[in-house]
Amino acid sequence: MKINQNSRRDFIATTLVAGATLAGCATKNPFTAEEIPDVKPSGEMVKLLSVDGEIIEVDKAFLKPVPELPAVMNTAAREGIAGKKFVMVIDLSRCKSVKKCQTACNHMHHIHPGQNWIKVYPMQEAEHTAPYWQPTTCMHCDEPPCVKVCPVDATFKRKDGIVLIDSDRCIGCRFCMAACPYSTRVFNWEEPKIAKEIADKPYSCETSVPQKVGTVGKCDFCPDMVRQGNLPHCVSACPNGVFMFGDLLEDTVTNGSETFRFSELIKDKAGYRLMEDLGTKPSVYYLPPVNRNFPFENKVESGEEEKKA
Amino acid sequence: MKPYLKPKAMRMKNIFKIIAFVVYLIPTVLLAETVEKNTLVLGVKYYNDNNAVQHLVISAKSKIDGKFQKIANIAVKVFITSDADKNNLIGTGITSERGEFILLIPPAAKTEWAKSATQNFVAVSAATKLYEEARGEATITKAKIKIDTADGKIVNAKLLVLTDSVWKPMTGVEMVLAIKRLDGNLNISETATYTTDSAGAVTGEFKRDSLPGDSKGNLVLLANVIDNDIYGNLSAEINVPWGKPLSYTTNYNHRSLFARRGHSPFWLEFLAYGIIIAVWVVIIYLVFQIKKIVKLGLE
Amino acid sequence: MDKLREDKIIADLLPQEFGKQGKIWVVCLLFFAALGVFAYGRQLYYGLEVTAMRDYASWGIYISNFVFFVAISLVGSLITAVLRLTNVKWSTPLTRIAEIIAVSAITFASLIIIVDMGRPERFYNLFLHGRLQSPIIWDVIVITTYFFISLLLLYFPLLPDLKIMIGFKERNGKWLQKLYVFLGSFWKNKAEQFKITDKAINILAIAIIPVAFSIHTVTSWLFATTYRPGWDSTNFGAYFISGAFLVGAGGVVIAMYIFRTHYKLEKYITDDHFDRMGKVLVLLALLYLYFNFNEFLVPAFKMKKSEEDHLLGLFTGEFAPIFWFAIFTSMFIPIFILLFKKGRKPIPAFIAGILVVVGSWFKRFLIVTPTLLHPFLPMHDVPANYHHYIPSWEEWAIAGGSLAGALLVITFFARIFPIIPIHETILETESHENEKHF
Ligand code: SF4
Ligand code: SF4
């Protein structure tokens, strides 16, 4: 199956330099990866110094960063990145409820104070089962019930599996909130308290910024970061490497410091998804909370966090 | 974090300010301004990709509330050699939201670069309203990696270091052999790192069978030296046809209940439009009946 | 029938100007409606923040009110269509009451849904970007359709009456006369015209039944198409429809009583009507009770983990007082009252009607809120006030305002048009007398 070349290009433009395109150096390999010829030179050449002290010219299109990658248009944001299928793996055995993920997410998306897109639940299935922390994001369901019910296409499923919200279209009926079994959606009941210069920016489905009054918001898997070749904010913020993100079609997930082959990881650690019985087919996988070498301390129950709320 | 304490703390701060103000009322108004400044830490990292593109990543951070945070909008000047002289300036930049920026090493650095096998990069920022002036440095020795493959899915990489104007193999350096992936690189086998032998070489076996590549099954292999104290970050890459051709299907254009507008399942469209048309035909018929009554009445 | 008797019927049934009571009633309604508009102004200005709805209880009494309005509007089809088709003659005086209740309720149902929207100014997106897959779009379509059918069903039988009204030029005054002329000057009591309207009314009576069923079924699907405990039920469509029949019939009994005493219509809306409506009400309440048993007993028997908190919350927990209040007032007590012949006299029947309607309103509240407050994952990482839902004064004012608005529409309709079909009543009396002759 042929992969849409345009979107492939988006990725390459962000990976630092393709060897074969450089003048003079790097032996040309017979097996040219398909991605490289896809990148169309911009014609704008950048001169730089090589390690050998030679001056070489490289087309700007092959360099990172393309300073301030322009935000994609609404239509492109609705389609998503072809040839990708994003997944997340959350390792419950590592989560200590440090909540750095939440802080980073709230900060980067300018979420209204008090609301959270990422929640870290203290879970205990039954009286005699072990308690554990369960961070939840949007599951980016493959058969998303929230998308099924949206009357105006304001929340939609993309080619790359991400479910996003168009806050410029949402009518605020909140049907999607009722439909989502993971309680992941939040609503902007009042004008979100965000800095003026952020609030004045045009809304982008990919950054989900700025949130708008009278519309829904939720975790977006940070496709803007992905487009720039970076990991979602929660993934890079977690000090314990709980979150792993990647492309299912590449069969790889990473938390920034460790990289795993997705299929092996899920097989070895018996990964599972939440509420499989509902048939929502989430894109977020969980690794069970086994072999934890730290105690489960619920500050909420011991009353420490009550005062916050 | 106990936010409810904040107002109190702020009040205390204000009280101190007032006291300070009273005490130093006459001689200094300056004092209040200088107290608040934070120290800024500038980081410089060197990258050499594919023995061609050399660049630096300059980062700025500062300890705020006891934690290091990335600082945006810091203007930084970068010099080659430790002496921050105008002539050695190789570029300037402003840190982004993520507190960093990338600087490609420009041709302007050519003469300095040629002088020695060891190079110094210095980043300097002037004092701003919030931060004191800062300086960061990196010293690297010129090095490069050669990567190649052999039969039986073997990856060979070699580290060469410039010594006395000759590229010589270097032993005892940790290297990573990996497959290039979207956000992180997947090691070619369970071995996390390899150490170069006396010939400066490492050899690894590719064990990621049937890992999806591109549509032809091509993969990009990488040999990396990561954050080395002497050599910085080095990388070299090569394409190999060792992957599984990617077969990719999407149901994006399928008709389904969760598809977009205009892509609802046929049964739903038939059902819905059928019912709508049937009922509205009746309604329109009745409206015409009203017209008929009107006509009859006017006769 | 002699001319005299006919004139008497006409004189009795002509709409009358508001008396003192009427004026007070209208002023009260206007006050509540204005309060609702004021509260809505605040909501537009500050956003849905002024309500008590939050991320968990993301729907509140607006949606309850919406369901209630949709339910009560179903009555139009019950009285007019079902009774018409089954050739039940005694219902003639009730048809127009039922129809106007239907029209005004469905109008306010659509208004209240706009009130519930976070971005009402984007309402046009429903037409610009409407997705056929969404039950909301189905609801929009059926509600519009039902509104037009109800309007037609109101209009056709009105035509002969309009002719009668036009005859009273002096009495009408300039504006009303203009309105009557505009609506019905072409009606000449011709046989062909009657033939067309009779046929049209028959078609409508048939067409309105499936449409009325679908508006309530689709409304129930807004809930039943989600996974949530308490909503995830295949029983929901039928459950909603039976509930709607009940509250609608209750509404008609109330309206019958008020029009009867206020306009002195004892001759037309007789004790017999109350007796029969009382029986209908008992039947419908039993039916609804049956569905309630299904809806609560079956899940309670299994006590699935996800349902447990929700069900216990209703039976013995946080919502138990409202739950038992609603069950008793909307079903048990009215059944008890109306089972007795004496209970089907106008006054007790009227009280039973009020109980049914009030109980049903709270029943709608219980359908919406407790479910939302019992999500699959526990409520967590939200401010403390997100855990509960107690409607704010703005919500009460808007909900109350919409009810007042619906009543205003009915009141003004009764001021302008004969609330009991004059022409049909005359025909009815005639045929009655003919029967006697033979
Ligand atoms: S988790 Fe909820 S919001 Fe996210 S895709 Fe699934 S149903 Fe939609
Ligand atoms: S609240 Fe917005 S996104 Fe959610 S269903 Fe309604 S219109 Fe769609």
Image (cartoon, coloured by chain):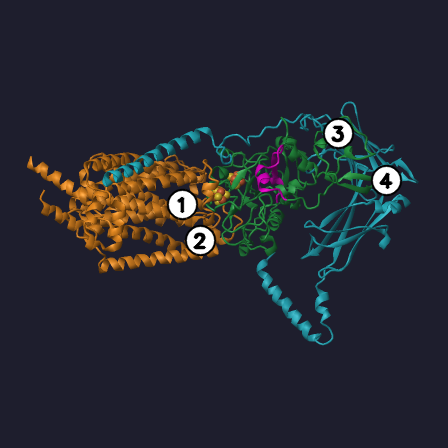
Chain colours: A green, B cyan, C orange
Q: Residues within 10 Å of mark 2 (few under 14, many from 20)?
A: many
Q: Chain of mark 3?
A: B
Q: Is residue B203 above or below residue A152?
A: above
Q: Chain of mark 4?
A: A
| Viewer-closest of B17 and B60 | B60
Q: Residues within 10 Å of mark 4 (few under 14, many from 20)?
A: some
Q: Is C224 displayed left or right of C377 in the figure?
A: left
- Callout 3 amino acid: Asn
Q: Dot 3 corresponds to which residue?
A: B239
Q: CA distance from mark 4 to mark 2?
A: 68 Å
**Can residue A75 be found in the magenta stretch?**
yes
| Viewer-closest of B62 and C202 | C202
Q: Chain of mark 1?
A: C
Q: Dot 4 corresponds to which residue?
A: A54
What kind of element bears circle 4?
Answer: loop
Q: Is residue A153 above or below residue C120?
A: above
- Residue, x 70% and y 45% (percent of image)? A67
Q: Position of residue C328 (x, y in %)?
A: 29, 46
Q: Which residues are magenta?
A: A71-95
Q: Dot 1 corresponds to which residue?
A: C368
Q: Residues within 10 Å of mark 3 (few under 14, many from 20)?
A: many
Q: CA distance from mark 1 to mark 4?
A: 72 Å
Q: Is A268 displayed left or right of B175 in the figure?
A: left
Q: Dot 2 corresponds to which residue?
A: C52
Q: Nearer the viewer, mark 3 or mark 1?
A: 3
Q: Chain of mark 2?
A: C
In the rendered structure, are the residues bearing label 3 and label 2 in contact, judged by CB atoms less than 8 Å apart? no
Q: CA distance from mark 3 to mark 2?
A: 60 Å
